Amino acid sequence: MTTRLDQYAKQYVQFEGERTRPVRDLLAAVPRTPVRTAIDTGCGPGNSTELLMAHAPDAAIRGLDASPDMIEAARERLPGLPFEVADVAAWDEPGAYDLILANAVLQWLPAHETLFPRLLGNLTSGGHLAVQMPDNLDEPAHRLMREVAASGPWAEKLRRVERTERFDARRYFALLSPLCSRVDVWRTTYYHPLRGGADAVVEWFRGSALRPFLARLNDEECTAFTARYRDAVALGYPALADGTILLPFPRLFIVATRK
């Protein structure tokens, strides 16, 4: 039997165009050096892997993701590539890759002070680590999520949903610079027009930031939580005249080249 959590890949690709644009921008900033081996960590349903293949057409490429649902979707999409279920936080292959892509995955993982240097260690000398992470924890969508979690009958269940770790650009630069010959860090805010008002915003986050909250609730609680969050979003993001909500979505980008 499938569950609501088994539909993660299907939920994610509802907004595939919007979610793919940042990784396209990220790979465009990676220096054009020879790539023999590359890996897509947190490959999701394979949309980012397709772009990695285009960037490095001669490379041996593989993909990792912690979600079996995502890996299944990636294998269906790109049957010629090896994909495996794996925890990126524990993945370690020293010196094995010329390019490591980490698109919208590292924000889910703890201990960035040690995680980022370890990922660099999995690069060859002169290899590149390309990272993109949502940088929106202080946006109304996330603030409202936390407020709804803390104020409802589910508050005790959701008390242990941790705020994911993200540093500011200055701290990542200071962490990576001693280990790298080049570190490029920038921040971009995308404005996504979501037709369908607050319901569309809820659907967007149901495939990402809402997941840790909904995973701890039963079906009845999920329905109530989602309805309350939707009402809060409707107030926090006023719709345009045609019902469209323009959702601001800041993202942090890093391209680091190992010494």
Image (tube, grey):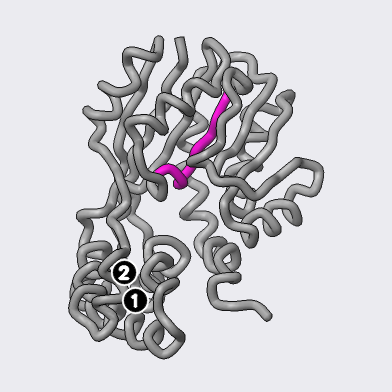
Mark sitting on residue 169 = none
133 magenta-colored? no
- Measured from the top left, where is residue 178 in percent x and y? 33, 13
Is residue 37 rendered to the left or right of residue 129?
right
Q: How many marks?
A: 2
Q: Which residues are magenta?
A: 99-106
Q: Circle 1: is it few (<14), some (14-19), or many (20+) Cα within 10 Å?
A: many
Which secondary structure type mostly characterizes the magenta part of the structure?
Answer: strand
104 magenta-colored? yes
The residue at the point 56 percent across, 61 percent down is 13
User: Would you identify the image quadrant in which residue 56 lies?
Assistant: top right
- Measured from the top left, where is residue 11 in percent x and y? 54, 68
Kindly indicate whether the residue at mark 2 contacts the one at mark 1 (C-beta within 8 angstroms): yes
- Give the labeled residue for mark 1: 197
- Measured from the top left, where is residue 216 in percent x and y? 40, 74
Q: Relative to 57, does residue 33 appear above or below in the rendering?
A: above
**Callout 2: SS:** strand
**Quadrant location, the C terminus:** top left
Q: Relative to 52, does residue 224 appear above or below in the rendering?
A: below
The answer to which of 34 and 181 lies nearer the viewer is 181
Q: Relative to 112, does residue 77 appear above or below in the rendering?
A: below
The answer to which of 181 and 233 lies nearer the viewer is 181
**Callout 1: SS:** helix
Mark sitting on residue 245 = 2
What is the spatial separation of the Cα atoms under label 1 and label 2, in whole angstroms?
Answer: 5 Å
1 or 2: tag closer to the N-terminus: 1
Q: Circle 2: is it few (<14), some (14-19), or many (20+) Cα within 10 Å?
A: many
Identity of the amino acid at label 2? Ile
Can residue 205 be seen from the camera position used here?
no
The residue at the point 33 percent across, 54 percent down is 191
The residue at the point 48 percent across, 28 percent down is 119
Can residue 116 be seen from the camera position used here?
yes
